[in-house]
Each structure stands twice: as structure tokens, then as C-alpha cells.
Amino acid sequence: MSKKTFYVTTPIYYPNDKLHIGHTYTTTAADAITKFKGLQGYECEFITGSDEHGQKIEQSAKKHGKEPIEYVDQIVESFKYLWDKLEVDYTEFVRTTNEDHFEDVKYIFKKVYDNGDIYKDKYQGYYCTPCETYWTERQLDDEGNCPDCNRSVEWMEEESYFFKMSKYEERLLKFLDENPDFIQPAKRRNEMINFIKDGLEDLCVSRTTFDWGIPVPIDKDHIIYVWFDALTSYLTGIGFRRDEQKFNNYWPADIHIVGKDILRFHTIIWPTILMAADLPLPKKVFGHGFLLVEGGKMSKSKGNVIDPVKLIDDFGVDAVRYYLLREIAFGTDGSYSTDSFIQRINSDLANDLGNLLNRTVAMVDKYFGGVVPQAKVETEFDKDLEEVAQSTFKTIEESLEGLQFSTALEELWTLIRRNNKYIDQTQPWILAKDEKKKDELGTVLYNLLDNLRRVAIALVPFLPQAPAKMWEQLGIEEPLESQSWDYVRTKGQLKVGTKVKNGDPIFPRIDVEEYYEKLEKEKKAKEAKEEKKMAEENYITFDEFGKLDLRVAEVLEVERIEGSNKLLKVQVQLGQEKRQLVAGISKHYEPEELAGKKVVMVANLKPATIFGVKSNGMILAASNDAGDLTVTTVDRDIDSGSRVK
Ligand code: MSP
């Protein structure tokens, strides 16, 4: 019998900046579905990576004074660090700068070329560098900007290679018709179909305006279009051309998970490239919605970018993953806010789940000396309890088939709350008072513990840490890793006689006020640190600048200082006051040339004696490397003594 396999991908992220909570969203979803399939007995491949080529990356590297590879290396490390913190278990991380990938991309390009689907022509169009996409005038937005990101575009003309995408229009429409589930969610499917029906144009698949990329195999002056390069990573990750068996086991991919913004690349460009390369198409592409912050788009300029690493440090990985998967229906946009985050964690994790575990284990300790009792009799609530459990697990299976993580978790919490209700209904503390009800009490506690066991396993795809903590408190000896979805569906797997271990609450409640105070303190500490750093870097503060007393002075008399070929003795009028100062400018000015000028001087410089002459102030002058010098005068006439600020 052939093995059941499952292959999921995330987009490969651009390493031009640190990743934010939006990127974390995609990868968490991919990790959760992989772990769920793993529980169901599938052998899984889960590929993520970094999309390292293109003009945008080249420019970012330059801005940072680095070589592109040096620049991306460092950012890719930050990606891997984040995925480790999120406890994401990808099986392969594909970097597009990796040699295997180079070869795969060149191979696919050549294959499509040899099949007669790539030709050379001249390209003209409006180019959006951040999106690495050409647009026609008709496609630009009302302001003449990129229709995707609304940033400005540049007119470009270049000799390019073109992929005959238009040739595949009919075939693609037929494929979409025959595979109605290919594009998920359904509403996005219609958008894509309409886009195709508007007419597919041939796609420009090479560039000559930059070097940072994979050369066209038949023409080294051209670089392969970054999306052609990036999409091929889905083949590289599973051993394309290197490990035939593995590739055949996993391709076509079961699902590409992407954001709605890049669905077009995955449901039009990618399938047509695969058709042209004689490869099967992926089974599904899911375009999820965007994670907004307090209702708006995250952006550096707004200063509202949520750093997932900080969130994990503050609340733990389980809380972050739970929130992302529970709060927003996969496929629609959703909004992050600290308030909703804390509320969700407190009510679901600390209250419902944490309390259920705590109360149950404490009662087993108290009434049965910590030893799992037998369920000898049935209570009147058991049937309903099990019916809820069965329907919960069935719904979880169905919803995860369609990547509906929030429904799956909502359903699991229905079961958790049902168990809390079971405690209220059966009132174990009353049963405990009556020796004749001991068996009934045993049944109640056994059912609660056994359901906690099932919940712990069912949580494995979503929360990386809590299930192990629950397992520990339940005292189960078999390793959690050995459990499968069958153990979730089947009741009564908990061994009677197991010794539970009462422990700390697995989700302590978060105090909202305290958290905001902590954020405020951190903000202040950060500002203080930045201020200190600025001072260290020779910045002066506004107050420091204010200490300089700069004034307009009128030059009255000037004479050379005997014995010096540099110095002039200058008398100036400074408002009501007369001053004498020494200026080292005699190589550049004749004394009579200076007299009558209104110059800018530092009026509060500590007086000094230079060459035996008292100097009380300093005239400002500008000079360059070539040795030219000019004193600073004022643009319009103004009274001497006026302050310069
Ligand atoms: N490099 C391309 C993908 C190539 S795949 C062959 C790319 N990279 S990206 O880093 O810009 O974006 C990666 C993914 O992050 C996309 O799926 C995008 O939709 C997703 N997200 C970026 N911001 C997001 C939110 N605020 N919310 C949810 N997902 C978001 O595109």
C-alpha cells in the first residue's frame, strides 16, 4: 500500500526586512495543518523559504552598504530564528540563492523554452519595483500608481523573454472548471476566473535592468523574472530532479497557502508554467485574508508593525499561535489588537482550558490520592458528554479539510466548556460527601481526565507547549509523540491507576493594566537608551544647541597682528556692545575687505588670549577641502546683535 503523503507550502518570504505578525500568520497555519495531517498518519513535507533575488533586494542591500548575499544571509537568519520561536517544524527551508534551486529554475526555463513557449521580444510598460511587476497604462490605479501596492511606477523598455501565457488561457479555464476546489476560498475563485476571462497576456519572464538573480540559461545577459524563480522553489523543496522517488511521492502539492495579494501568481502564472513544463498542477491554492492592526494596514511609517518575537516573549508561543488561528476566520481579513489578544487568552486558555485541567487534577488528588479511578458506573450526563465529543472531533476533521482553523478551535472549546459544565452538573464535591456515590465520583473524574487527554492530543497541531504540560499533569506514560488522531476519537484510552501530577496553572491570567504599564516602562527605557545612543554618536540635543549664543556682528575695524600671517584683530559692534576678537582668516581676506560686513559670530565663547591679543568671540566661516574660505554673512540687512538660531 502506498504511503499517505501530504505536501504543504508557505510563500517564500522576501528577505528585505524582518518578518511581522502577518507573515507569522501564514506559516503558523501551514504548520498547524501539517501537524494535524501528521496526527492523521500522513507523511508530511512542509516547505518554507526565502525569495532572495530581484531588484528590490539588490537595492535594499545597497542602501545598507552590503553585498546582496551578505545582506540576505543575515535576514534569513532572523526568519529561521522566528520559526524556531514559533516552534514551526518545516521540513525544508528553500533559499533561492541555493545552488540546487538555481539549477531547477534554469531547467524549467529551458524546458518551457524548448517546448516553444518562451520567445524574445521588446517590452514596454510601467514597472513597479516593490512588486517586481509590469503594468499596462489601463491597469494603473486612478493616480497612475501600481494597482497592487499603490506605489509609484516607472516607465521601462527592455528586450525580454516572454512566456506564452496567453496560449494557456482556455486550458486553464477548463482546469478551473473541472477542479472547482482548486482555488480557495470560493469567493476568490470567481475573482481569478474573471481576471483570466479578461484575457491573459504573455508574461515577461526576464530582466536586464539588474544582475541579482538567476541568468537565463540561453542568454546570460538576462536575469530570470523573480516570480518564475520563486514559484519553482515549490519543486526544489521536495527534491525535484535529485530525488525522483520523493518528488513523485509529494508532487503535486496538496496545498499552497498564500496571502490573497499573491493568489494571482499562484493560480494563473504558476499553473500555466507547470502546464508548459509538462508537470502536474498543485491540488489546491488557499488565499487567506490579511491581518490588520486596529483595523488598518501594518506599516513602518505608521509605527504599528507587530513584532511576533516580542509577542512570543511577552505571552508565550501558545498564546500567539492560538490567537492567530482562533481569532480570524482563515480567508477573511481580521484585526489584531492587544485588548482582543489578552481577552482571548484569558477567557479561552486561562479560564476554560487552564481551569478545567486544574480543577480536575486537584479533585483526583483530593478524592483519589492522585490515582486515576475507574469508570464503573454511568451518570445521566455521560451520553451527552460523549456525543459532544464525537461531534466536536468530526467537525474538527471537516473544518481542517478546508483550513478552517478558527472553526476547529471554536469547536474544541465547545467540548472544553461542555466538560466544565459536566463538573457543574455532576457536582463532584457533593458526590464526595456520600460514600455510596464513590463509583459515580470515580466515573465523573475518569471522564474528565480522559477528555483532557483527548483535548491535549487534539491541541498538538495548534499549541506546541500546552499539550506536553497537560500530558505531564495527567501523568500519562506513553509519549505524546506516539499518539494519533485515532486516540482522540476513541474514548477510554486513559489507563486506570495512572498517577496524576498536580502542577502550576498552564496559562496564568494576564493582567491588562499591568501589561500596559510594562509596555509604557519599556517604551521609556527604549527612549532613554536611544537618547543615550544619540549622545554617544555625537548628536547634540536641542538644549545643547541652545547653549550657543550666535549673533550677527558688524565688523568695524580690522588689522593684521604683527608676527602672524594668519591672524587678524577684528573690532565688531554687537548691538550696544563693542567687542574685540581674533580671526584666523588673513590668508583669505584683506582687512579692508571685511570692514562693514555683517557676519555671524559665537558670542559666548570663553575669552582667550591669542598671540598676545585678547579675543572675545569667534566669527563663523565656511571652508572646503580645496582650502577656499568665506565668512558667513547674513542674507538681508539686520541689526547687529540679532540672535541667530
Ligand atoms: N516572495 C513573495 C512570495 C513568493 S512565493 C513563491 C512574497 N513575499 S512577502 O514576504 O512579501 O509575503 C509573503 C506572504 O506574507 C504573502 O502571502 C503575503 O500575503 C503575506 N502577508 C504579508 N503581510 C500580511 C498581513 N498583514 N497579513 C497576512 N498575511 C500577510 O510575496
Image (tube, rainbow, N blue to C red):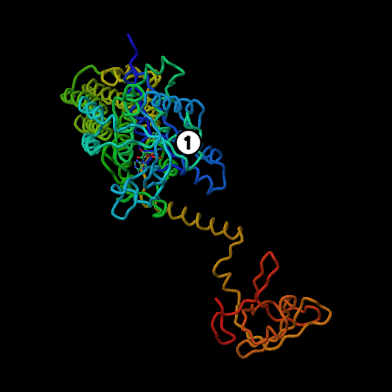
Q: Which residue is at the front of the view, 212 or 501?
A: 212
Name the side, left or right, on which 368 lies relative to 130: left
Residue at left offset 69%, top offset 83%: 593
Question: Can residue 429 be seen at all in this image of the molecule?
Answer: no
Q: What element carries label 1?
A: strand
- The image shows residue 299, relative to residue 79, as above or below, that is below
- 458 is higher (above) or lower (below) than 626: above
Furthest-front residue in view? Answer: 121
Q: In front: 337, or 69?
A: 69
Quarter assignment of residue 584: bottom right
- Up-down relation of residue 277 to residue 299 (above or below): above
In this rendered view, identify the residue nearer to me: 256 or 176. 176
Residue 361 horizontal/vertical position (percent): 33, 28
Residue 386 occupies which quadrant of the picture?
Answer: top left
Residue bearing the label numbered 1: 222
Above or below, 261 relative to 217:
below
Residue 295, image x, y percentages: 29, 50
- Label 1 CB, ligand 1: below 8 Å? no
Q: Quadrant of residue 159?
A: top left
Residue furthest out toward the right: 563
Circle 1 residues within 10 Å: few <14, some 14–19, many ≥20: many
Query: Looking at the figure, which quarter contains the C terminus?
Result: bottom right
Task: Describe residue 563's horizontal placement relative to residue 265 as left or right.
Answer: right
The x and y percentages for residue 180 are 21, 28
Res. 480 visible in picture: yes
Q: What residue type is labelled 1?
A: His
The location of residue 432, given as percent across then percent down, is 25, 27
Quarter in which the N terminus is drawn: top left
Looking at the rendering, the quadrant in which ligand 1 lies is top left
